[in-house]
Image (cartoon, rainbow, N blue to C red):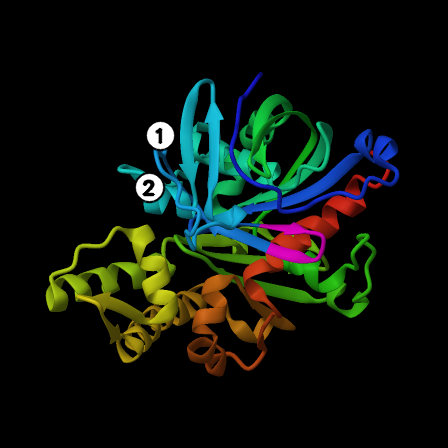
Amino acid sequence: MEKILPPWDEVDTASPEGEESWSSATKNVAIDIGYGFVKLLSGQQGIRFPSVVGRGRELNYLSPLSKNNQPLENLQININGQDYFVGKLAIRQSELASRSLEQNRAVDPNAKILLLTAIGLLFQWEDQKFNLVTGLPTSYYANYSKEWSRELGGQYNIEVRQKGQMRQKKIAIREVYVIPQPFGTLYDQMLNTIGNITNQELSEMLVGIVDIGYKTTDYAVADKLEFIEHLSSSTTTGLANVHRLMASFLQKNFNLEKQDFELDEIVEEAAVRVAGKAQDLSSVREDFFAEIARKIINEISSRWDYRQFDIILLTGGGGEALAQYIIPHFPNMVLVDDAQYANARGFQKLANKLFDNA
């Protein structure tokens, strides 16, 4: 199963010391393919890029003074002769760009493009092996996890652009382990970097996890680390609802038409430029956040009696955005630190535990 992928620059550079032994080692990686952003870790550094893919093409002029000159601003891959722009490059340069929104990742070509692009950012050697932990939304896990795992494993021949040069790479994804996405946050809270339990108290608790993402909010329950499936579910409430409300507001008030992926920056910065002038959207955004938060509060209350839990972990990029509206309604709920990357950190810790001898 060969794939050809090119252009992006190195994010992580390797030391030449011990190169031969490290190049033959298998690297444990964690990739959180969200419907809004792909998140991964390079060492202790969190990396993210929009889950957007567009048809690539030759860019006839690249300005040497461009402000968009960082590696994550210029992700591009080629698969079987077809070029694709990924992330911010797709948003800027693709005439037709789309998010990866399929429930079944295995049949969504964008999902594979996003995952291989993410692995490309972690390359250190010309020939490298990887073990992978990733996740799926709670309600999609039972139906699609095995198929997604099978789809990801295998050999890939790729080309990447490093420091302006195209270089061939070979990778093997040896082991793939797929978990319900919110469990990444649980593992992040209780494991150390090598995957050993350091929060024994949490491991004995009945834990609820509310993971608010772009397209979905995932609800997961763990009883002494056991996944309680009948109390776990997903809904289609997420920050995409805020994007839709904002798109309607911009169209009505400024006659602006914006694609969903164009709204990421507008919602994050609570501002939009119209005819060269910045328009403050802070109060509008807060109203929309409060509206979506009320919906999630109702979803939590209809699914769970919050009093049965020892603790409820609020996580995800949406968890960060909506925490101030949701947490006051649930006295045993806490927002985890750096919640946007919590699942990816947990995936990484679990990978280090599962594959330490792989």
The residue that mark 1 highlights is 57
Q: Residue at x 44, y 34 (%)?
A: 104
Q: Which of 310 and 213 is in front in this view?
A: 213
Q: Distance between the residues labelled 2 and 1?
A: 9 Å
Find residue 12 and name its label. Answer: none
Does the magenta segment cover residue 156? Answer: no
Name the quadrant containing residue 314. Answer: bottom right
Instruction: Judge whether 303 appears above or below 325 on screen.
Output: above
Q: Is mark 1 on a helix, strand or loop?
A: loop
Q: Residue at x 46, y 48 (%)?
A: 73
Label 1: how many residues lie within 10 Å, few (<14), some (14-19) or many (20+)?
some
Q: In this view, does 349 lie above or below 143?
A: below
Residue 208 to residue 147: above or below: below
Q: Where is residue 131 in the image (x, y as percent from the top left)?
A: 71, 35
Q: Which is more toward the observer, 18 or 48? A: 18
The quarter of the image holding the C terminus is top right
Return the x and y of residue 76 as percentages of the image width and height.
Answer: 46, 35
Amino acid of disc 1 = Arg
Which portion, as a residue range, is magenta?
Answer: 40-46
Residue 13 percent location from the top left of the image: 71, 44
Q: Is mark 2 on a helix, strand or loop?
A: helix
Q: In this view, does 54 lie to the left or right of 323?
A: left
- The label on residue 93 is 2
128 left or right, relative to 196:
left
Identify which amino acid the numbered label 2 is placed on: Gln
Q: Is residue 55 left or right of residue 346?
A: left
Query: CB atoms at circles 2 and 1 under 8 Å apart?
Result: yes
Magenta-drawn stretch, dominant element (helix, strand or loop): strand
Residue ID at (53%, 38%)? 8
Which quarter of the picture shows residue 204? Answer: bottom right
Side (left or right) of 56 relative to 133: left
